[in-house]
Amino acid sequence: MGDYKQFLKDAAIQVGSGGSAGFVEVCIMHPLDVVKTRLQLQARVQINSPHHYSGIIDCFTKMQRHEGVFAFWKGIVPPILAETPKRAVKFVSFEQYKRFFMFGSPTATPLTFSLSGIFAGITEAFFVNPFEVVKIAIQSDKRHVKDVPSTWVIASRIVRNNGFGGHGLYRGISATAIRNGVFNGIYFGLYHSLKGKLPHSTQNPTYDLLYKLSLGFTSGVLGSCFNIPFDVAKSRIQGPQPVNGVIKYKTTFGTLKTVYLEEGWRALFKGLLPKVMRLGPGGAIMLVVYEHIHSLLTTRFSD
């Protein structure tokens, strides 16, 4: 019974810490996620469209001109609503998977952290995919922000027209699972493997904070670079199809092949810069905020 109570207390602390960290990260970095999605959704055939974007600055400029400044926070409600359960699943499952992947070692190894991160990411995907589908639907809408339907209206429309399954709120689940698994495997694996490696001679609160921020930034950047093709596939599958009534992008690897053949290998890395600009500093912010709040809550609720 004591172990069960301790598990519940640890889980509650992880929920509070992760939810707070996720909320801060989303509010600060969401505009870059919108820009990333816009760049990923456009194909070569759209180049003459007034809503075609040649890059990040062009996208920011045209969105502000045609849709208003608040357009940069389009689709923010789904990720905010998803953050607490998402971070709860991410951090709680990460800690539980760590126990499974110890492989007899008395302490966690880099392999432990990486495998735990991969499976935590896959687990997380099943909770966030419905929010991702709604978010992409809102972010891809190029009307002025005041004319875009609410999150509830969009979600209801998706359920009404396509249901909850693979054509509805769980469209693109395999791409989401691979994307999250790859990112979290690198993100957690690198960060936790190197977090304690700061030389003792330079350890002080300022250096420790800067080191963790730098490590979180590097982990987020590398994770983004490796998982971006699956993110592109996810956006294409979950976003509006090029021709109404015709589903062009269906499976993860089928979508990757289609994008590669029609648009070249560079198209598989569309949106990488805004993604890195978001998940580099965003990853650093999230981990540092998480650990800070986790430490405060642990101290507050310690026996």
Image (cartoon, grey):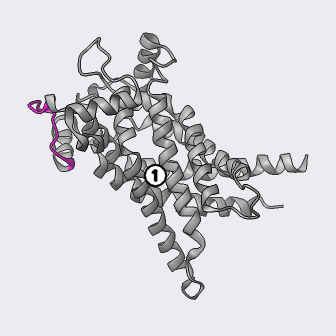
Q: What residue appears at the point 33 percent right and 27 percent down from the top-left corner?
A: 239
Confirm whether the magenta stretch covers residue 213: no
Q: What residue appears at the point 51 percent right and 18 percent down from the top-left corner?
A: 165
Position above or below: 209 against 102: below
Q: Residue furthest left?
A: 48
Q: What residue appears at the point 36 percent right and 27 percent down from the top-left corner?
A: 254
Location of residue 149 in the rendering, given as x and y in whole percent from the top left corner: 34, 23
Q: Which residue is mark 1?
A: 25
Classify residue 125 as left or right of residue 269: right
Confirm whether the magenta stretch covers residue 55: yes
Location of residue 238 in the rendering, given as x and y in whole percent from the top left corner: 38, 27
Per the picture, the main secondary structure of the magenta-coloured stretch is: loop
Nearer to me, 194 or 67: 194
Question: Label 1 is placed on what type of residue?
Answer: Glu
Classify residue 282 as left or right of residue 274: right
Q: Magenta part of the protein: which range?
A: 46-56
Nearer to me, 68 or 111: 111
Position above or below: 48 against 272: above
Identify the element where label 1 is drawn.
Answer: helix
Classify residue 258 as left or right of residue 93: left
Location of residue 210 in the rendering, given as x and y in whole percent from the top left corner: 47, 73
Label 1 packing within 10 angstroms: few (<14), some (14-19), many (20+) = many
